[in-house]
Image: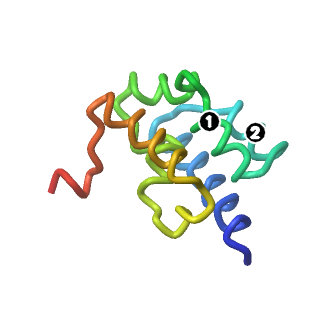
Amino acid sequence: MSLEKKLNTSLEGLYRRTLKEARYNGSYFLKMLHERGGLAAAKALINKTDPSEGFARLWEIGRLDLTVEAFVLENPEFHSLFTSEELGKARKRLTDLKYTRKADEA
């Protein structure tokens, strides 16, 4: 399986986790995954000037760990699919909201 296909499958898993754990139905995200594929969807969300509605909702409920930005940053195997600028944008979006990974808190 190619890395891009693995990312797509993993992001579909992220959608299911978000639905189950946060009871948030990111239907727009799922639609993006199906229409564009995981890589294009993730890049579109990361490169948006303002955070997506889903990102904002996950922030409101204290689940930034379920955002695409956090997923990409916390899974180094996918870093090669993104530019350093994109990784930086994702990192800044999260750090601006004082997000720290659960592993960093331990």
- Looking at the rendered structure, the secondary structure element under dot 1 is helix
Residues packed near mark 2 inside 10 Å, few (<14), some (14 to 19) or many (20 plus) = some
Give percent across and percent down for residue 12. Answer: 66, 53
Position of 1 relative to 6 (above/below): below
Instruction: Return the residue nearer the eye: 105 or 95.
Output: 95
Instruction: Return the residue nearer the eye: 58 or 93.
Output: 93
Q: What residue sits 56% from the left and 28% below the top?
A: 54
- Residue tagged 2: 32
Looking at the figure, which quarter contains the C terminus? bottom left
Position of 43 relative to 58 (above/below): below
Q: How is the image coloured?
A: rainbow
The Cα atoms of the two marked residues, 1 and 2, are separated by 10 Å
Q: What residue sits 67% from the left and 37% below the top?
A: 44
Task: From the image, state whether disc 1 or disc 2 is nearer to you.
Answer: 1
Q: What residue sits 45% from the left and 30% below the top?
A: 58
Q: Is residue 99 rendered to the left or right of residue 89?
A: left
Residues packed near mark 1 inside 10 Å, few (<14), some (14 to 19) or many (20 plus) = many
Position of 4 relative to 86 (above/below): below
Residue lying at the far bottom of the rendered structure: 1
- Residue tagged 1: 45
Looking at the figure, which quarter contains the N terminus? bottom right
Q: Is residue 86 rendered to the left or right of residue 36?
A: left
Q: What residue sits 26% from the left and 33% below the top?
A: 98
Contact flag, marks 1 and 2 (Cβ < 8 Å):
yes
Q: Which amino acid type is marked by label 2?
A: Met
- Looking at the rendered structure, the secondary structure element under dot 2 is helix
Q: Earlier in the sequence, mark 1 or mark 2?
A: 2
Give percent across and percent down for residue 36. Answer: 81, 45
